[in-house]
Image (cartoon, rainbow, N blue to C red):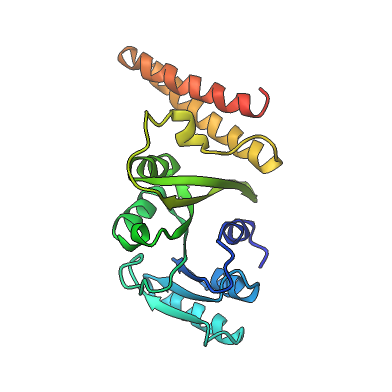
Amino acid sequence: MNDKRLLACAALCSGRPDGRAADVGTDHGHLAVYLVQQGICGTAVACDINEKPLGSAKENIRRAGLEDRISTCLSDGLDCVPSEGITDVVIAGMGGELIADIISRADWIRTERVNLVLQPMTKWDHLRQYLWDNGFEVTRELPCTEGRFVYSVMQAVYVGGRQRGECSLAYLYGGLTDGSTEDGRAYLQRQAQRLETAGRGLMRSPDKAVTAQRYLAAARELRERIGG
């Protein structure tokens, strides 16, 4: 597997030989196969809301000779996924709002303290805000570039309660990413540009000047992480 985005997801799984991973929105099942082949987890369940990609996943699992270790499940998010033994849940390649909705419908993620690996394509700010407000702690983030796109993969776990204080705009856009790697700098640069574009747009409305300054200040904060 040479997909940098999925490799980053694999790197944030808990790496337990006795673990069981749920790959939500599995598409062709490549990640589930990789996790088991590499010993990152012992078993996995590949799930998707659509029958066609799930059929492709079944075929790839068969070709890998892993039918006894990877099961498949037709499911809207985690709704039909058996929770027993699940140690890791990977939800990648979706919008942040949809990821938050999937998490909100699976109470067992909280009670079992499941390791979450989340990769939002859009609405990353919505997802980070949801996690902040609902007792989840983001413990690590891995930025990665894939062609002209740049992403951040989050690792999170439920710790209970609500985090103190307000979630800053710089955090909602930049998360825990720093400028120590090329991918990290690329991610922060992209997010800073988005904040600046939004801030300049808001400046056109006099009644939104305060909000505009917040966006511009957050953009500066992200640029400071990459040294300017």
Q: Is residue 106 visible?
A: no
In front here: 107 or 159? 159
Count of numbered badges drawn on the protein: 0
- Left or right, 108 with reference to 18: left
In front here: 129 or 138? 138
In front here: 121 or 67? 67
Question: Residue 19's spot in the image, x, y percent?
Answer: 52, 71
Res 215 quadrant in image: top left
Q: Is residue 75 visible?
A: yes
Q: Residue at x 57, y 56 (%)?
A: 12
Q: Residue at x 36, y 54 (%)?
A: 98
Q: Where 115 falls versus 71 (above or below)?
A: above
Query: Which quadrant of the figure contains the C terminus?
Result: top right
Q: Residue at x 49, y 20 (%)?
A: 216
Res 64 quadrant in image: bottom right
Q: Residue at x 43, y 16 (%)?
A: 213
In front here: 224 or 18? 18
Q: Where 105 falls versus 142 (above or below)?
A: below
Question: Residue 31's spot in the image, x, y percent?
Answer: 56, 68
Query: Which quadrant of the figure contains the N terminus?
Result: bottom right
Res 178 quadrant in image: top right
Question: Residue 74's spot in the image, x, y percent?
Answer: 36, 76
